[in-house]
């Protein structure tokens, strides 16, 4: 059995420290346990790293960056092709036009052939409308289906 290759969106690095959402925090920590146990092959990108660097709370920013190191999350960088694909998502309103980085997260998952993206962004990423449009665009552009999941759904793998 191959180990799923998974893209971790920015919320996955902030929710381990979200005391106001104990259930989501617990699920997120279980995903990191799966990574530690070798059940998931984790990736992220420069888009996530930039969002983390933009975090105004210094202690939180350092803790988030520490997770990337501790769990050996691979950095995919950024990509012109991801930006092109993200623009198609934005044009089709899969993600609101004011959130291009959220579209880039999904695009990085697709262009790198990862199995799925895990996110707690329920407003712009993990929602049925986004999933439906992303699937249609990815198929048209020659990319395979990617999963878009919240942490609880990953725990069922």
Image (spheres, grey):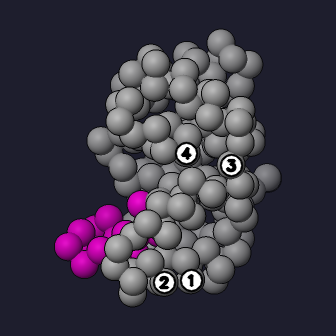
Label 1 with label 2: CB-CB less than 8 Å: yes
Disc 2: which residue = 62
Q: Is residue 155 magenta?
A: no
Looking at the image, tell me whether mark 2 or mark 4 is earlier in sequence order. Answer: 2
- Marks 1, 2: nearer the viewer: 2
Label 4 with label 1: CB-CB less than 8 Å: no
Q: Which mark is residue 105?
A: 4
Category of crowding for the residue at label 2, using alpha-carbon neighbours closer than 10 angstroms: few (below 14), some (14–19), many (at least 20): few
Q: Residue at x 38, y 30 (%)?
A: 97
- Main SS of the magenta part reads helix
Task: Find the distance from the CA under tag 2 to the CA under tag 4.
Answer: 21 Å
Disc 3: which residue = 78
Q: Residue at x 46, y 43 (%)?
A: 102
Q: Which mark is residue 97?
A: none
Q: Is residue 128 visible?
A: no
Most extreme residue toward the top is 140
Residue 65: quadrant of the picture: bottom right
């Amino acid at each position: 059995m191959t180990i799923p290759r998974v893209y971790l969106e920015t919320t996955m690095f902030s929710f381990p420290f979200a005391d106001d959402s104990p259930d989501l925090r617990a699920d997120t920590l279980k995903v990191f346990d799966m990574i530690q146990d070798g059940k998931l092959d984790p990736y992220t990108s420069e888009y996530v790293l930039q969002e983390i660097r933009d975090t105004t709370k210094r202690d939180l920013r350092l803790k988030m960056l520490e997770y990337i190191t501790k769990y050996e999350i691979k950095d995919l960088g950024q990509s012109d092709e991801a930006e092109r694909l993200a623009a198609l998502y934005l044009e089709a309103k899969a993600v609101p036009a004011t959130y291009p980085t959220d579209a880039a997260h999904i695009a990085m998952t697709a262009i790198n052939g990862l199995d799925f993206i895990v996110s707690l962004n329920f407003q712009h990423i993990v929602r049925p409308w986004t999933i439906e449009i992303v699937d249609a665009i990815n198929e048209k552009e020659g990319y395979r289906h990617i999963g878009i999941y919240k942490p609880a759904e990953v725990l069922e793998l």
